[in-house]
Image: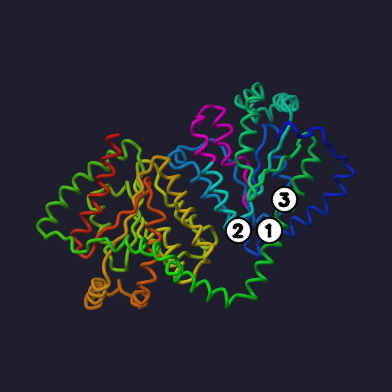
Amino acid sequence: MLEKVDLTKKMSKEDFKQKMPELERKIGRLQRQCRDLNIPVMIVFEGFGAAGKGVQIGRLIQSLDPRGFKVFAIQKETEEEQMHPFLWRFWTKTPARGRISIYDGSWYRKVLIDRFEKRTKKKELPKIYQSICSFEKQLTDDGNVIIKLFLDISKKEQKRRFKKLLENKETAWRVTKGDLKRNQKYETYQSYIEDVLQQTDTDYALWNIIEATDKRFATVKIYTTVIRAMEEQVKHALKEQDSKELKRAETVTQEKTESVADVSKADETAKDLQQSVLAKADLTLSYTKEEYKEKLKKLQDKLELLHGELYRRRIPVVLGFEGWDAGGKGGAIKRLTEKMDPRGYVVNPTASPNDIEKAHHYLWRFWRAMPKDGHIAIFDRTWYGRVMVERIEGFCTKREWQRAYKEMNDMEKDLAEAGAIVIKFWMQIDKDEQERRFKARQEDKEKQWKITEEDWRNREKWEQYEEAVNEMLLRTSTEYAPWVVVEGNNKYYARIKVLEAVVGAIEERVRL
């Protein structure tokens, strides 16, 4: 791709002065439109060293309202960032709806500079490319505009610019040994860039090559490229807005109906398969109080030791708890953590998203809470709300919850490939047991806060939730992030099964 680029392109000062005022007005107007339409924009600057990324970013933001954007300079990973999956630091830097994030360097550092410096191995590349494409697809599906710019200059031009920078004490610091080495091996580094362009140039996140030898030409092309991408998204958003206004009532009703009836519309064979997941749980399984106490002590003692081993070996653990209301999530989590070092785990209670969380991709708040190496993150309710409560209650569209299965599988795969142990628990009880627990809570003054009118209303949709849960378990139980269905009518049995699953998974890992 790069060998076809004409790096001799130039623009006269007169043409530049003629074109820029209109481009500056357009981009300022588009920023306001994106803000009003809640469109998040991500502008990625990559390129050869000394190609002018910093200069061009500075030129671009002159035309933007500073209250509506943030620039991120991406350098070598910090110690904290190294202890998370590599995309973690970029998920946390994605823009809220209506805002702009500008990246000086990006997630592509992993397959460019890190590859050149041999921190990224060739055998790792396919998985990294897959993660990057999934990351960009999830964000663009959620309405983000991703504009990827690669600033291209020749080896000779790069060497000339380095020399000029090094001759001045005020700018010499900007040229690193790595920059000079990449210039010496320009062709090798260029081949890595070609690989990146081929692997990640997609219809949802195109690469735009910027001929950067002439700064004026590069500036105009960058403005024009960014404006075109923002205009397309604004047109699309306005069209969607008009369509929604015309069909709002019909769409909401239809999607709610479709979401709860989706499984029942499938053929009988598929429905039988879906029903069998929860139906095969043996809810008569139980332990006596004496059996429970004996097993509990042994397992908690083991987990106490294993927790220290996790920290020593820097193994992260992600545990997700879902289940019926009053299914025993809280009790299981309490027994799980009783003998853990509180400095090494966090329990994340998941409620309805707040306004800040709603302004981001639904996975954003969960990515932010993922543990660093050697630590444990426990989620009381999880990202799977997307395909349960949001699906049933119509809080997201059918298209959104249907694509969520792959999005969640991809996220968990990223975690697992970064070394995390990922286990998800579904706390299964029957409807009669739930009713008994609800009534017991109402009669206990110390536990009345645990029961709400919403809990009783959700019981009326038991069958709809059951269908959604069955589909969720089928689509998202993987070798790297399995679902464990916990027979929970007997709390003693449920707590022990959770502990056994966690202890077993950690023991298997530390033996490897």
Q: Quadrant of residue 4?
A: top right
When asked about the image quadrant of residue 288, the answer is bottom left
The residue type indicated by label 3 comes to Val
Instruction: Indicate yes or no whether the magenta region holds residue 297.
Output: no
Identify the mark nearer the N-term, 1 or 2.
Answer: 2
**Corner quadrant of residue 216:** top right
Q: Are marks 1 and 2 in contact (CB under 8 Å)?
A: yes
Q: Position of residue 325 (x, y in %)?
A: 32, 68
Q: Is residue 208 left or right of residue 342?
A: right
Up-down: is 185 above or below 104? Answer: above
Q: Amino acid at mark 1?
A: Gln
Q: Earlier in the sequence, mark 3 or mark 2?
A: 2
> Is 238 drawn above or below residue 440 in the view shown?
above
Residue sitting at x 38%, y 56%: 474
Eyeballing the image, is 466 above or below 153?
below
Q: Which residues are magenta?
A: 101-129
Query: What residue is shown with label 1?
Result: 233
Frontmost residue, 509 versus 466: 466
The residue wearing badge 3 is 226
Point out residue 293 in the picture as x, y percentages from the top left corner: 13, 55
Residue 134, horizontal then vertical, whole percent: 53, 48
Residue tagged by mark 2?
143
Q: Residue at x 38, y 43 (%)?
A: 420
Q: Give the residue type at disc 2.
A: Gly
The CA distance from mark 1 to mark 2 is: 8 Å
